[in-house]
Image (spheres, rainbow, N blue to C red):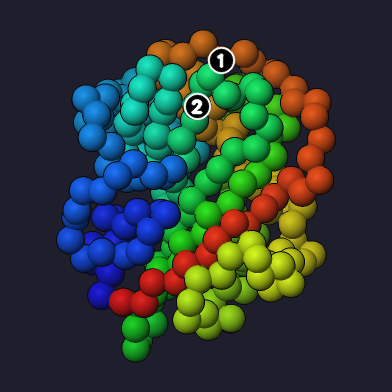
Amino acid sequence: MLEKILNINPNGSYKGKKKTSSRTEFPLHYNVSGKHSIKDTITFSPAALFLAHINWELKEIQYPSSENVFLKFIIAGIEFFVEINLNELYSNIMQQFSILNVHRSKIKEKAVLVKLSVAKDKVVIMENPIKFEIPFINQLYDRILDLDLHSALTNEDDIMMKNLTDGIKEQLLEEFQNILYGVYTFLDKLGKFNLVKNYLFEHEVNDPLIIERITVIHG
């Protein structure tokens, strides 16, 4: 079963018990003093009200350094892990995500962990919160489940990765970019960071959405 799925490291494998490890790109537990209680930091704040408007559930916020913010939040049942580096926010056109979804059937449970990078188009602070819907991220998960994977899939499996996003890549990119707008707005409303609003990324990339790894954890 996957009762302890929240202890998963998005770069590693599922572990039933919490255990300390060396720092990776998207760890869930930093050994730093910058970890704060969600209730202590944003309850009744503009940031909390914003999350309520867009129907996101913030599970964790950490500050690994003065220039880094790690967020773990849930949208429509899917967990998103993202780390924002303020030093590289405007110079690095790609943003990494890890996303986790747990599929339950009558027979078994399995979690699907997807690590990917998406191109940033602009830094937007949302004045009027939108309703976040992620039908194409859900469709991506449906396609992954149809593969019935028994081992990890990496970007070396080029053909299979392309098939997963065939016909929906543009829509997937739009959903992730909208999620980034929500992240930027949340950070702005925390009042801890001064973001350059309406910043446009003018550099183009060959592939604006890259799935780097897919891991299926059977319960």
Number of marks present in the image shown: 2
Q: Quadrant of residue 49?
A: top left
Q: Is residue 36 left or right of residue 112?
A: left
Which residue is depicted at the point 70% across and 19% down? 199
Answer above or below: position of 174 versus 115.
above
Spot occupied by residue 177 in the image (x, y as percentages of width and height): 65, 40
In this rendered view, identify the residue nearer to me: 109 or 97. 97
Answer above or below: position of 179 versus 46.
below
Q: Nearer the viewer, mark 1 or mark 2?
A: 2
Which residue is depicted at the point 75% across and 22% down? 200
Q: What number is the disc on residue 195?
A: 1
Spot occupied by residue 144 in the image (x, y as percentages of width and height): 58, 73
Which residue is depicted at the point 66% across and 23% down? 91
Q: Is residue 55 left or right of residue 138?
A: left
Answer above or below: position of 203 versus 190.
below
For the question of whether residue 190 can be seen, the reply is yes
